[in-house]
Amino acid sequence: MISRRDFLQATVAASALWGASGVGNWGRLAAQQALTQDKLLEFEDYGNVTLIHITDIHAQMKPIWFREPEINLGVGEVNGLPPHVTGADFLKLFNIETGSPHAYALTYPDFEGLAKGYGRMGGLDRCATVIKAIRAARPDALLLDGGDTWQGSLTAERTKGQDMVNVMNALKPDAMTSHWEFTLGIDRVTEIVEGLDFPFLGANIFDAEWDEPAYEPYKMFEVGGAQVAVIGQAFPYLPIANPKWMFPNLSFGVREERMAEVVQEVRDAGADLVVVLSHNGFDVDRKMAGNVEGIDVILTGHTHDALPEPVMVGQTLMIASGSNGKFISRVDLDVQNGQMLGFRHKLIPIFSDVIEPDAEVAGLIDAEREPFKAELEEVLGTTDSLLYRRGNFNGTWDDLICNALIDEHQADIALSPGFRWGPSLLPGDSITREDLHNATAMSYPAAYRSEMTGGTLHTILEDVADNLFNPDPYYQQGGDMVRVGGMGYHIDVSKPQGSRITNMTMLKTGEAVDPAKTYVVAGWASVNEGTEGPAIWDLVEGWIKKQGTVTVDPNTSVQVTGA
Amino acid sequence: MTITRRDALAIGFGGLAAATLPMPAFAATVEELIAEFSGGAEIGSGGLTLTAPEIAENGNTVPIGVDAPGAVSIMILATGNPTPPVATFNFGPAAGSQAASTRIRLAKTQDVVALAKMADGSVVQATSTVKVTIGGCGG
């Protein structure tokens, strides 16, 4: 029988059997344990190779609240498969007790109540403690950063990512890959990358003019007597989902044939283990794992999923390590003669009140924040409502932003992008400038005011919906659904592009949106060069200060079917 | 004799004659174009690789590659464009490989179709959907 403690261990052959059904008994023992640092870190070393995975930190150096999604739909073949399982279904699937620390860390139900009991999560000083503890046991463990590291806070925005670069350098990653990094602009990325002590990998990043590889595709490491190849895969749709004028000479894409070539290349070069450090997103990685032979482990990122057990695709192990510094995955592997014989895995939740901060990294974080301290801490107002973003449709943070856009720009309709980043706030929390920037900080923040016909709005919603709900993951381009204020609609996610969105209705009047009529639309984060308007954080700050206390009413304006 | 890189390139391309087709004013349908190319031969699959991005980064210049070892001719059609024919590549006996790449403009999301005619007259087809999106919101 397969033996398990609070982590998973199995031979790969056996895993494939139960891996198909998805899940085991991960939570039961974990829930019974007292929450101590020793218990959180407890791990019996296994095999000869250790991987440490952290991803999608979004510049969150300090502990945060982060509510996991309530709605995370999968379409087509992945409907109902992890990570498209939330709330009570997630708890049931992974056998996690309601109200337990892991229920708080991994799901949304009773988030407010559990947050008060278990405290904030994350903090790179706590992550440092975990990483150092793993390295104490396994000195040659590889620390691999899945990207979306240098963007997402006021300090990262002001320092053009330098604060995160400095703090991450102290953690000594062995490699990283990328997505939002490129929204700093190609010149800044080049400047940072030239100074890194570790490779910035991207097998799928090409020079757009010459169609030649633009970054190192992989790096070979010797770990525990095995040759471990780490291949980088950057976010495939950067020039579409983010402003391509910021990195005009680069081309991305899934490039499945290229991945197959690089896997072959590293095998020919003697790799015993092939690891893909990916920012593809879970469903894209799942498809790639099935189509490309020879990948042993995919450390997946981008879609912010945290899974307490690996998902097996054939013989490939998929590891999803969450976001915002909430989790670190440790994967121990037994690698012999070019084969992965077994693994032991643990998704380590970073409970900030339980894990002792590492003094050196805590000092470094304080030093990075010091010049901005007064700005960060200024209280703009208070929230009466739970503020969160993550989920396929509207979250309350975006409802707040849309309300501010409509009021300040005197608009009929507001659009807010479906980003997955942005931590949460609890009812009664002060909203500091830091909190607002955590939900908005990026390099193309102009809050525009423009006019669009109802027909154009429909086209936009259909286009974005197809980027999320196309049944083929390779055609899913990026974020969650664009968030809409002032207008409601019905979406049937099972329909093809062009017929998903119906019943577009103006909320104020209850009138149907007229395809021929022109509406005033406010929004932010346009990918078009030359977009004009105040920075979204300035617009929302002014609005919050006027409100004093902010209340976000329950939003039922999006009706979803077909899931 | 030394062969410079430029000479080598010239030799390599000697066997490849590419003709970009400014199509006649009458718009032939995709079905008609396929029928004309295949000459009525049954259309199979396999032996032809069509490489195209899943989502175009720029619909005005989408990189497309075709590779069909042993082909004498490869035709590329953009089925959703007002004028579907993109190019037909003819390979002579001296061609080092039967592969070509080009960049094409796609008006909207559509299927790009490639057909390869082999030396024995058989014809194979490969199809790839390329999405042209207005983008944004990646997150």
Image: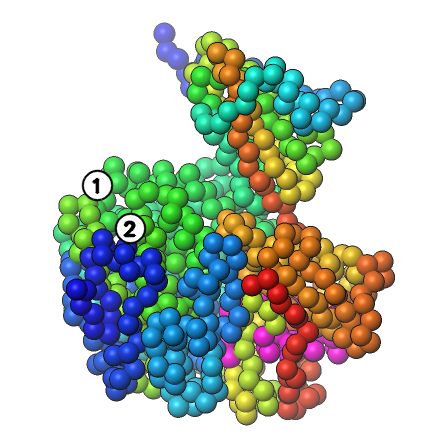
Residue for badge 1:
A270
Residue A403 on the magenta span: yes
Give how far across and how far down residue A37 sits, in percent: 25, 82
Amino acid type shown at disc 2? Gln
* Image: A273 above or below A553: above
The magenta span reads A395-424
Residue for badge 2:
A315
In this view, the residue in front, A559 or A115, is A559
Circle nearer the N terminus (2, 1): 1
- Tell me if I can see residue A176 in this picture: no
Determine the secondary structure under disc 1: loop
* Image: A415 above or below A299: below
Give how far across and how far down residue A272 sits, in percent: 21, 46
Image quadrant assignment for residue A24: bottom left
The colour scheme is rainbow
Q: Nearer the viewer, mark 2 or mark 1?
A: 2
Say which chain tag 1 marks: A
In this rendering, would A297 be left or right of A449?
left
Count of numbered badges drawn on the protein: 2
Give how far across and how far down residue A195 sits, in percent: 38, 57
How far is disc 2 from disc 1 in space, using C-alphas? Answer: 19 Å
* Image: A541 above or below A3: below
* Image: A140 above or below B37: below
The quarter of the rendered structure image containing the N terminus of chain B is top left
Identify the residue shown where x is 33% and y is 42%: A293
